[in-house]
Image: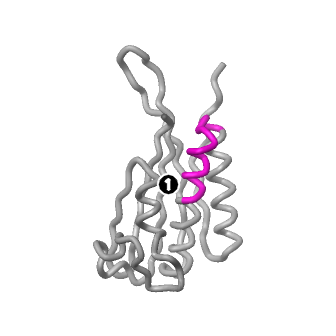
Amino acid sequence: MTTPTPENEVLPVGSEDDVVRVRQAVRRHAITLGFSLVDQTKLVTAASELARNVLIHGLGGQVRLEPLPVPISGARPGLRPGLRMVFEDQGPGIPDLDRALQDGFTTGNGLGLGLSGSRRLMNEFSVESRPGETRITVVKWKA
């Protein structure tokens, strides 16, 4: 028996309620894709941090959730589930990305662990940022 792969989903981020909806949607996708409880928590934690950054620093934007059933070959052929999350905003951008990725760096009232912590929780992490456009793409693969 196979579980159907969830569809791509785009969620707006314009309020704290939207951040909660992003967390709920990520958990739903993670469960459907068969992630462990530990990995579900990692996905939801990273999504929460990054969605909150979109809201606070990017002045709102959106999140795209893309389930990734990737074919694998070899001794155990099949599909490797994963979840790609793309956070986008049209805010001022991140002027010093290297500094922003350091633990403890913050321009707000947080602990400065949002970007760096999210990077540690995911398998893949990339940032593109310039004034008027920031896109953070993260992927977590099922172990």
The relative height of residue 112 versus residue 136 in the rendered view (above or below) is: below
Please state if 26 lies on the left or on the right of 96 as rendered. right
Residue designated by label 1: 85
- What is the magenta range? 32-45
Instruction: Name the residue: 39% across, 75% down.
Output: 133
Count of marks placed on residues: 1
Is 32 placed left or right of 127 in the picture? right
Is residue 37 covered in magenta?
yes
Task: Report x, y in % for residue 71.
Answer: 42, 27
Depth check: give the residue in front, 4 or 42.
42
The quarter holding residue 36 reads: top right
Badge 1 marks a residue whose secondary structure is: strand
Vertically, is 66 above or below 36? below
Q: How is the image coloured?
A: one colour
Q: Residue at x 33, y 67 (%)?
A: 128
Which residue: 31% across, 82% down?
95
Tell me the kind of residue under disc 1: Met
Image x and y of residue 80, in percent: 47, 31
Magenta stretch, main secondary structure class: helix
Residue 141 in the magenta stretch? The answer is no
User: In x, y percent, where is residue 63?
Assistant: 54, 62
